[in-house]
Image (cartoon, rainbow, N blue to C red):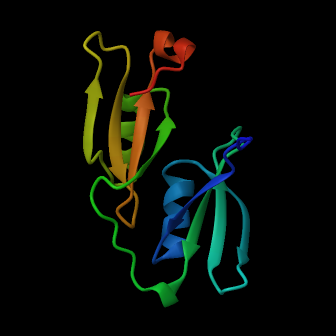
Amino acid sequence: MRVSRLLHTRYRVDDLDRSVRFYQEILGLDEIRRHKSPRGSELVFLQVPGSEETIELCAFPASGPVHVQADLTHLAFEVESLAAFAEHLAAKGLRYSDGPHYKPDGSGGFAFIDAPEGYEIELIQRSPVAASSNQTY
């Protein structure tokens, strides 16, 4: 027996509205639903257009403030161009927290930005060769 597919990944946040704005305005995700759980958590589900998996942002103040330790976890998203995405970030007053780092032949690479709570977001520019082979970084 095995699982059939990944449904969502949950990240707990202190400021739900600020985090939702980040994922929508900076990454272009769509809010697909919002509700309160039986235990009182405020939940927002976000999705990359064209993707099946979702990201669940959860605000649950009763559990205390969120403390994200360095290099604990990250989400990775594909972008067409790291250079173009850097321009998008600059227009929003942001910049990469690490990178971009390109392959030696310059055909692909990766960079990181930090979400409001300190979660890392990896952005990957894949080369045509990497895209056809499903290679990741």
Q: Residue furthest front?
A: 1
Q: Check the image and report above or below for 41 versus 18.
A: below
How many marks do you count on the picture?
Answer: 0
Decide if residue 137 is in sight here: yes
The residue lying toward the viewer, choosing from 122 and 86, is 122
Q: Residue furthest bottom?
A: 62
From the viewer's side, name the closer residue of 56 and 99. Answer: 56
Along the horizontal axis of the image, is 49 left or right of 115? right
Quadrant of residue 56 within the rendered picture = bottom right
Quarter of the picture containing the N terminus is top right
Residue in the picture at 61% in, 50% down: 29
Looking at the image, which residue is at 34% across and 73% down?
67
Picture coordinates of residue 42, whole percent (x, y) = 63, 79
The residue drawn where x is 64% and y is 54% is: 8
Relative vertical location of residue 132 with respect to residue 57 in this rendering, above or below: above
Instruction: Tell whether 18 sits left or right of 44.
Output: left
Viewer can see residue 90: no
**Residue 64 spot, x, y in % from top left:** 42, 86
Q: Position of residue 117 (x, y in %)?
A: 39, 67
In the displayed structure, does residue 98 sit left or right of residue 7? Answer: left
